[in-house]
Every structure is written in C-alpha cells, then in structure tokens.
Image (cartoon, rainbow, N blue to C red):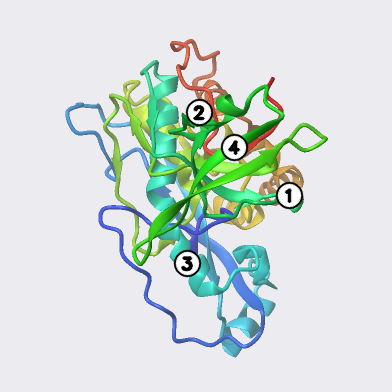
Amino acid sequence: MRFDAGQTAWSLPSPLRAPVPSRRRGRLPVAAVRPDYELIQMNASRLETPGHDRPAPAGAVCAVSYRAELRPSTWELLSHLVDPQAAVVARSRLTGGRPVDEFEAAGLDDSMWSLESATAAAAALLGEPVRELGRGAAIEALRDDTVGLRCGDTIIAVDGRTVETAVHLRAALAGLESAELTVLRGSGAEQPGSLSKVAVNRHPDGAWGIRVVTADRVLRHSIDARFSMPDDLRGPSLGLACALSVVDAFTDGRLAAGGTVVATGTVDMSGRVGGVGAIEFKARAVRAHPHVRRFVVPAESGADVDNARRVLGGRAEVVAVASLAEAVEVLCGFKWRGKKSIHRSPDRQWVSTVR
C-alpha cells in the first residue's frame, strides 16, 4: 500500500470505495517501509478544471509517497532489514495505535475533507470568497479533564443559540465561563440520534478542552478543481501538492516554471501547512530524481526537515513553509500579492481562550 504519510489514511473520492479487509495476519506489531520512487504530477492530467481553459504547465508540481506493508510477511521483514533504503518500524508509528482495518477505513472519511480543504485554501489565496456550511461542530478529541461530553458528539447549540460550524462554536463560547450545550449523540446508520443537554465549564487554564470539526461540512467557492489519483494511494499530506497545483492552474501554469517541484504536507482551509511523517523516506524518493529542484515540506515537521536535507545532500533545495502563501512565494520568487483571503480558520481546532 502506498501512503502519503499523514496521521490518518485516506483514499480518493469519485467514487469512494470501501477498503477490502486484508487477509494477511502479520503477527508482529511492525510495518515494512520503503520509498516510493514514482513522483505523481498533480498539475497535469490528474487535475481537471471544468469550465476553465488552462495552458500546459511550465513546470511540474509533484506529490511523493512511501510504500508500507502494515502486516508484513517474514520475507518482507527480512528484505527490508537488508535494504539500506528501507526500514522496519513500529506499526503504531503509522497507525497511531489503531487497528490496521480501522486505520485504512478512516481514509474514506478523510479523503473528501482533505481535497476540499486544499482547494478552498487555493481559492482563498486567489481572492475567491470561501464560505463554510455545516450541521454543527463534531467533537473529534477531548482532554482528559473534560467531562460530560464524548468523542463523536455533535454540538448544535450553545445556550439555545444554533451552532452550524466549528467556527460558530468557537465564537459562541467566547467570553463565557460556563455554557449549556445541546448535543446530538449516537447518530448513525443504525441509530437516529438523541438530543442531550450538557453543562460544561471552562477549565482554569482558559480552555474548554474539546477539539471540533464542522459536521457535514460543505465549502462554497467559485473554483472547480478535481483530482484523479492512483487507487492505491492514501494520505492527507497530498494537500500541499494539490493546493499548489490549483494555484498553478489558475495562474497561467507558471507557478513551478523551469523544473520539477515536489511538495508534501497537509493544508487546512485557512492555508496553514501542517506537519506529516515519513519525510525521510520521501526525501530518499526525491533523491532518485536529479531533475527535482525543490522539495517543499512543512516547517512544523522540525527534525524531519533536517533529515530531508541530510538525505538530499544538496541535490535539491529543501524549503520549509508554514502556509500555502509562503509556498507560493517561494515558487514564484517574489512576494505573493493576491487578494486578501476571506476565510481564516483552521479545519480542526481546540476550542480554548477566546475573549
């Protein structure tokens, strides 16, 4: 299986296909990992822009992945141990401790979300208004000291005031020390869900201790961009390459003029570039392509950025960026002067001190 090294696996929409459970057993809690030497050009035939005629790109914007067998056979383990470009790592480093089937199935939920976020970030950078619609704020994570709520609950009102998105929830809780939340609990294919009232208090450190995402999110903007990906590729860190490809398509195809650029990183709808894993394996794949001039990576990946520079050894410039706008400026060679973005809120956020 090929991965793009995010914290959660995902696969592509159009159409979404349920993963086939693996029959392999893999008794040891390890994974066999190696570079995937194929660069996937995102700004050419894999990108469709209905209604927008664009010239052929003057340079290639590529994504790069790595290959991982999460239930490796004995032969795969031995072959990876003797291959200097491969490695055997703890399976939990890739799955976050979740069962393999659950880890792979989670990709179906993240696929549409990741590509929509990348496209919306590109639209905002190009000056297009972006509007987020939803049906509440779904709780994705809780601090240990937060009581009364559960992961999977959807908050639809604060003190009787309707909440449609994660941003609305953050605004509704701003300035409050306590609140009564209306929560939709237990909804799904088998249960219609029930409404509950939950009283919550702000923690002494000023945080509410919940991380939320917009439930049933829909993003409205005027950019129509669609990607076609290999069936065996998973990973939210394709987002940066996808977002750069959309910007390239709507700026006369000259964003990466003069060569090949490889990018990896998540991108939320505000344009923030998030950290990913396995950058060293991706750098090994980039090293095999001498025509790559830049490898754009998330700045927050820290030591992994230094590892990428060590692996490449000057063969390609490693550029660490914190935002999509910063990445575009690096590739353009001058400061980006697009219109001011309308939307400035991350996809996933801890609801904390906002007074």
Gap in angstroms between the C-alphas marked 1 and 3: 27 Å
Element carrying mark 3: helix
Res 77 → quadrant: bottom right
Residue that badge 3 annotates = 104
Residue that badge 1 annotates = 307
Relative image position of residue 113 (x, y in whole percent): 42, 45
Asked whether disc 2 touches disc 1, contact meaning CB atoms under 8 Å apart, the reply is no
For mark 2, does the 10 Å Cα neighbourhood hold few (<14), some (14 to 19), or many (20 or more) residues? many
- Left or right of 52? Residue 4 is right
Relative image position of residue 309 (x, y in whole percent): 71, 44
Nearer-N-terminus badge (3/2):
3
Gap in angstroms between the C-alphas marked 3 and 2: 31 Å
Asked whether disc 1 touches disc 4, contact meaning CB atoms under 8 Å apart, the reply is no
Which marked residue is nearer to the observer: mark 3 or mark 4? 4
Gap in angstroms between the C-alphas marked 3 and 4: 36 Å
Residue that badge 2 annotates = 168
Label 4 amino acid? Glu
- Residue toward you, 57 or 64: 64
Which marked residue is nearer to the observer: mark 1 or mark 3? 3
- Residue toward you, 171 or 112: 171
Nearer-N-terminus badge (3/4):
3
Residue 295 visible here: no
